[in-house]
Amino acid sequence: MIEQSFKETNGLKNKVVEDIISCDLKDDSGLNDFQKLPTEDLIAIPKVGINNFRLPIELVNKAGETRSHDATASMYVSLNANKNGVSMSRLCTILQQTSLESPISSTFFKSIMNRYRDELRDETDKDLIEKSFLRLKFNFPLKQKSLKSDNWGWQYYPVEFEAHESNERGFELFVSIDYLYSSTCPCSLSMAKQYEREYAQGKTKEGSGIGVPHSQRSKLTAKIKIDASKEFHLEDLIALIRSAIPTETQSLVKRLDEQAFAILNGAHPMFVEHATKRIFKAFNAESTILDWLVQLEHIESLHSHNAAAVIYKGVQNGLRADTIF
């Protein structure tokens, strides 16, 4: 019985080896090319490709300066049911070639999306690949002036550019950005001031007469759909968010700046619901933003849990809250 099982196992191994060696398709160098072989599985794959591919990219800032950024890329195409695989290295080669020739822009992404759909076909007389996808992630540095003192520091914004192209929806370009801010609880602020008044009036002797409202570092992640026909700068998006929520965390502060930050927080107390409505009004007033979705989280200093919210524009077949849960 053991000998028979051993023979069957060896027979199966030999068949696998034979199948591997006897590939009917060869590449230009004469090596076996399994990627282009047909498949009998007939299972389509919506997205297949590469994650975490590193490369430097260039971006022109609002001042017209070209800056280099260390980025990571995720790139995919859809795979038809009769296809065995795609050329992974071709995804990387196209991205690298294009990034050396031009900084990132709508034209940059359109070119790559089209090349993925065109050049990853096995045969040029076949239809374009149905879908292509590219995401570039990097940190965008921006000089941030101190609130009062004559100082400045670098504020870094995690950014993602995401491009899609398909037969059904055409070309779409999205930008996501993280924005950190301070949020002071209105209820806590009110109770602290009520306590201070009562202490000054002699109604209570508890504490020192100073009440400190709770505030916390908070995070907003916005994903917007860009009008690819119009000029876009990350600086404008950051300024728009800051206009709605001005209590952005600071990169460099002296005592004057720290006091100014306390005054700024006191002038803009907000629940997560308030911050959500502020960003709703700001984004809906900007015509160049075609669609948007925002997640907010107040990382509570009072509670051991966080307050959170999600809101979106509500475009038909657009970004939705249920796409992130």
Image (cartoon, helix red, strand yellow):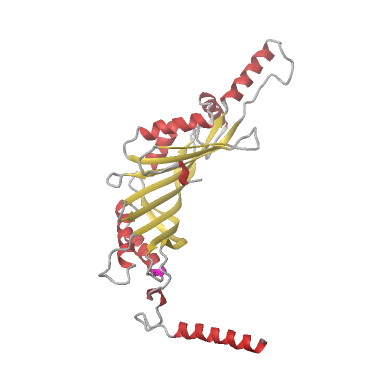
Judge whether 160 appears above or below 291 on screen: below
Left or right, 224 with respect to 221, comes to left
Along the line of sight, which residue is nearer the eye, 258 or 129?
129
Q: Residue furthest left?
A: 125
User: In the orientation shown, which residue stands out farthest toward the right?
Assistant: 205
Count of numbered circles on the image: 0
Where in the figure is residue 137, as x and y percent of width and height? Answer: 45, 53
Q: Is residue 59 left or right of residue 148?
A: left
In-front residue for pair 306/218: 306
**Quadrant in the picture for the N terminus:** bottom right
| Vertical position of residue 285 compared to residue 177: above or below | above
Does 296 lie within the magenta span? no
**Vertical placement of residue 125 versus 52, above or below:** below
Q: Nearer the viewer, residue 15 or 201?
A: 15
Residue for point 39% across, 32% down:
282
Q: Is residue 140 visible?
A: yes
Q: Going 43% across and 61% down the picture, which residue do you hit? A: 55
Give the side of residue 147 with respect to residue 299, left or right: left
Query: Residue at (57%, 27%) from the top-left corner?
Result: 185
Whether residue 87 is in magenta: the answer is yes
- From where the camera sits, is residue 233 visible? no
In magenta, the rendered stretch is 85-89
Residue for point 65% across, 89% down? 3
The image position of residue 117, as x and y in percent, is 32, 62
What is the x, y in percent for residue 240? Answer: 40, 35
